Amino acid sequence: MKVAAEKKDIKVETKHIQKSKNEGCELSKSQQTRVTSKKSNSELNTHFITNKEKLNTNIQAPSSILPFIERTKLEESKVKVVKEPEKACIEGLSKAEIKAQRRAIQDAQRNAKINQKSIVNDKQPEKSIKKVENKKAIPLKTEVFKTLDKHRVSLFNHLYFEEFEKLQSLKNFTICNNGVHPVFFKLGEEYRSKSILGSNARCLALLSAFKTLVIDFKTPPNQEFYRSLELTIGVCVSYLNKCRPLAVSMTNAVRTIKLLLTQSDINETDIEKKKNVLERIDRYIQDDIDTAGEAISLRVQEKVSNGDVILTYGYSSLIKRILVDAHKREKRFKVIVLDSRPLLEGKEMLRRLVCNDIPCSYLLINAASFVMSRVTKVLLGAHALLANGYVMSRTGTAQVALVANAYKKPVLVCCENYKFCERAQTDSFVYNEIGDCEALATINTSERSTELVNWKNYKKLAPLNLMYDVTPSDLVTAVVTEIAVLPCTSVPVILRIRPGE
Amino acid sequence: MLETELVDVINLISDIRHGKVYTSYDVAIHTEQLIEKLISEGQWNTAEDLMVLIKARINRIMSALPQESTPVNIMRHILKIIRELYDTGFKYKSEGQQSLHHLITSNVDNAEDYSKPLPSLRSSLLDHLAEYKTGLELSTDNIATQALEHIHADEIILTVGKSNTVEKFLKHAAEKRKFQVIVVEAAPLYHGHEMAINLTKSNIQTTVIPDSAVFAMMSRVNKVIIGTHTVMANGGLRAACGVHMVALAAKRYSVPIMVLAHMYKLSPLHLCYEQDAFNICASPADVLPYSSGPIINKVHVYNPVFDYVPPDLVTLFISHQGGNAPSYVYRLLSELYDPNDNEI
């Protein structure tokens, strides 16, 4: 419901972008001057609250967001004035309505000013009003902070980000729209709702969005095409980063494209330049993702023999491709798909393998020890390969590798070159992503019910849904890349020879 | 032995199968009551008669519920009590504890004769059983009171699924000390959810993680405290599915694993790594629901219930008597059961 509501918001916003942009500027200017011209806060506050109430009822914000709204109400009352048009566009009001509302606000403020003038002679009452307000405000604030600490695992405090602030900044983005192409709003929402999931899929979606951007791009007057495109890409990418932290594959792709832009020839017409950029993006998709996948697939097929029992975990587009390719080449093997909550990506893997007539078994990850003795090879996908040879992948990958290691089974990690990352990481705590806690509290494997649905009622309870974990290099037998089959520790060597670094 | 004579044990088996008697504590208490009733009301004259009756029940349970060790262990222990009382009744051996000499020679004189009638046996047995029963009832509390010896302030403790003993243990520690608990949800039964809610009700900071995040979290965990289904003779565990993985992760990060085990969970049997030899599979519908469509016709879905954890992954057993290393389990076993009863 949350996602649906937000999606709606964004749609509405994109419609209103142009209007609200212009009006927003006027409005904020006029009101900011008013704010500075000393008027009693009480009037203002009551005003915001009524407005906020409207907002609450209108967006039907999920209860988790409400405390944050409350906090910002107190802290950022000044900013609120600036955000007036934004509320309007959330509510989906027409231009006339916005105007009417604005007029009402201005009237109220004028009245406030008049009232204030009458009080100015006598300073005492004004102060007392302020004092009362402060007394009211302080306990509220602490309460709000308490609710913020709730349901959080202190080890991961650095990874949580305010859902509401996030939304706010997203909306700011849409309002002051620094040239973010609408396709990125759609994409951002797809990332956020995890309807596009997986390192490769996210990267491909990003690249195709870039292509749309390039096609629609108009060079601003007196600016050079590549420079301004680079800037726009930067803005779009930082927008996407706010929706969901970028995958390593995406940062690498963005970096490569930016590098291409800076190295390109400036003395061409814009049409040629566009063609050039599109061509290069296509070549990136072709070479670094598609052909790389094919090369890896060929390499792994050499290692798959008849009668093998291959264990895999979750969903990886590359692993799926390898297995399907191997099956098409008349290799006869069985696949065991392990899966884990809450994403249950393994089901997708299972579905696609079964569609290709590959015999499959399906188990949850805690049964890894149950099947491991029957397995001959373990194939795992990766989110990124880190400079110290550790593998970053979906949570649970490390565990599967660990069990495989205990049963002395070879573990092959398949990863395209473009997912290599200069970062070195030894634990799953510093860089990670916290997924939706709600997903953990709802059971999606069976029709069971769980008490955890009401986790928000318990102050000291915190479901934790980590997205990634880091597999130590000693648990991995080899990494298969398009260049070679390598031990994990050779990752920095590949990083060094990678072009354009 | 006729089926009609075994009706008590058949009822118990059916109760366990249908989940009416679910926790191992309940199973233990019910078994003890069954034997108590058998002793007070059963048709027997000599110790040998009684032992035949009990052994028939053990065989019945072992064939019907091969994975359920608690009732068998309870009965085995009662067999040992009978032997001891018989021996002391006839002053065959010196009173009190078994001597080291006896321990060594006990296997030799296994052709003992229990056929002489001993009139005082029934009453003294009932006395001993009453004592044993209170021991069973207090066992959880006795384990819980040791909590403060093992949990220090500000620890991060990981536990898997739900165990009443672990829950009490942690709650007892929480009365005095502040610490965090990470509960692994243990899909597809999700007992971890219930555990987490129970703990958080006692004001313990609780985090619920999916089974997949164990390795990621383990590096920050101070201790793993779990319950188990059975402790095998070598100190290994037959525990809930997924515990082996947790134990491997703990071993990798040198995190101590403490297993809270009642005495009746100690089994004189051994397990091998061969999964089919000890595991059972529950309904696969919990893993892949029937609503998944035509795909379920084409895949094998397994939902194993148990995991074997080898003794080298376990750090400590905590029973009501205190803490013991896995290497000491053999000694506890020889105190609990008579070597003649290990195989029935």
Image (cartoon, helix red, strand yellow):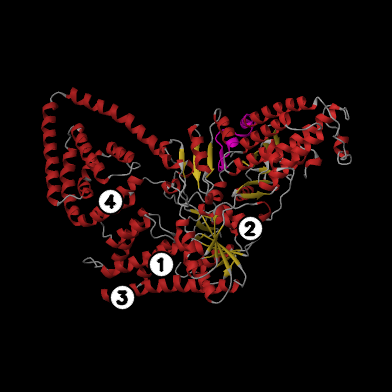
Q: Say which residue appears at 59% left-offset and 59% top-offset.
A: A473
Say whether mark 3 and mark 4 are on the same chain.
yes
Chain designation of label 4? A
Q: Nearer the viewer, residue B292 or A127?
A: B292
Secondary structure of residue under mark 3: helix
Say whether mark 4 and mark 1 are on the same chain.
yes
**Is residue B65 at least partly visible in the picture?**
no
Residue behind mark 1: A256
Residue behind mark 3: A275
Indicate the amino acid at tag 3: Lys
Secondary structure of residue under mark 2: helix
Within 10 Å of disc 3 (Cα), the crowding (few <14, some 14-19, many 20+) is few
Report the Cα–Cα distance between label 1 and label 3: 17 Å
Would you say the residues marked 4 and 2 are in contact, meaning their CB atoms lie under 8 Å apart?
no
In the shown orientation, is residue B154 left or right of residue A57? Answer: right
Secondary structure of residue under mark 4: helix
- The numbered mark at residue A405 is 2
Q: Position of residue B214 (x, y in %)?
A: 55, 48
Q: Which residues are magenta?
A: B141-166
Residue behind mark 4: A171
Q: Is residue B159 magenta?
A: yes
Within 10 Å of disc 2 (Cα), the crowding (few <14, some 14-19, many 20+) is some
In the shown orientation, is residue A110 left or right of residue B64? Answer: left
Chain designation of label 1? A
